[in-house]
Image (spheres, rainbow, N blue to C red):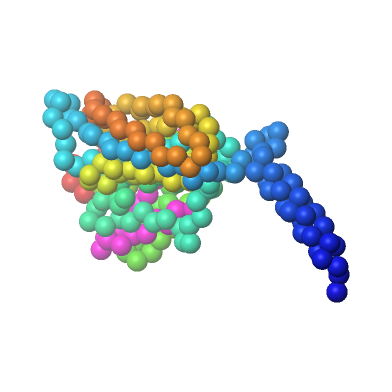
Amino acid sequence: MLPATDNRSRCGRQRIWAAIVFAAIAISDASGQDVIASSNTVSGVIRVFDRNGGELTDRSDVVVFIDGLPDSTRDRDFPKPPQVSHRDRQFSPRVLPLVRGTTVDFFNDDNIFHNVFSLSRPKSFDLGIYPEGTSKLVTFSEPGLVKLHCNIHPKMTSTILVLNNGLFATTGMDGHFQIDGVPDGRLTLRVWSEFSEEQSRTVTLSGGGRVEESFDVYETKRFVQHKNKFGKRYPEKY
């Protein structure tokens, strides 16, 4: 058995080494890629107004996200690919934010044939026509907006918002959003909505704090009927 003085000396050295290791982990390197995130939270409410200034009761599908962080910060790990279904001649969800590099499952759970295509610059693809109960996978590697359409049904449309990190939230009907695990710092909070202009705001967070931010979103953009994948109008009947 070691003398008590030796035990105290060993414990002291262990505490010193633990402090050094903790400090090394907590401090980022020069590239800024190893930042340890505090438990900061950004939350708030989105109010949505139509073109006439009337407030809407449905405030869903507005995406709020943190921009300007290293790509490796808080990427989300999905247990299985997120799914875009084709039910009732509609894509669901209508808006899907995800981290770049995510693979999406396009599942046809309708009782008719469907197609999925996009002519968007971040991801252009055409999955062809496929029947009920089948699916096809697509990986989205570049950030940006990807508009989805069906070459058979002109009213089928959806948007995938490909982001650089997993710090985002999508509003429900009540307009509330909450983003947890945000790192310390002066960061950019962005708001995206299908029929509105994008908004941004600078927020400063530190020490596990909570910041409340609310936005008013005005739907100034009109729905414009897209053309099919050949650049032609859809037939009147389908």
Residue 132 painted magenta: no
Residue 47 in percent (x, y) is at 23, 34
Q: Residue at x 13, y 25 (%)?
A: 52
Residue 87 in percent (x, y) is at 26, 57
Q: Residue at x 27, y 61 (%)?
A: 110
Residue 114 painted magenta: yes
Please state the extent of the stretch shown in magenta in the rendering. Answer: 103-123
In this rendering, the answer to whether 16 lies above or below 221 is below
Q: Residue at x 45, y 53 (%)?
A: 104
Who is closer to the viewer here, 198 or 121?
A: 198
152 relative to 28 in the view: left or right: left
Where the N terminus falls, by quadrant? bottom right
Q: How many marks?
A: 0
Who is closer to the viewer here, 121 or 73?
A: 73
In this view, the residue farthest toward the bottom is 1
Q: Quadrant of residue 29?
A: top right
Residue 69 in percent (x, y) is at 54, 35
In this rendering, the answer to whether 120 lies above or below 102 is above
Judge whether residue 238 can be spotted in this image.
Answer: yes
Q: Residue at x 33, y 43 (%)?
A: 177
Residue 51 in percent (x, y) is at 17, 26
Who is closer to the viewer here, 172 or 111?
A: 172
225 relative to 184 in the view: left or right: left
Judge whether residue 230 can be spotted in this image.
Answer: no
Q: Quadrant of residue 24?
A: top right
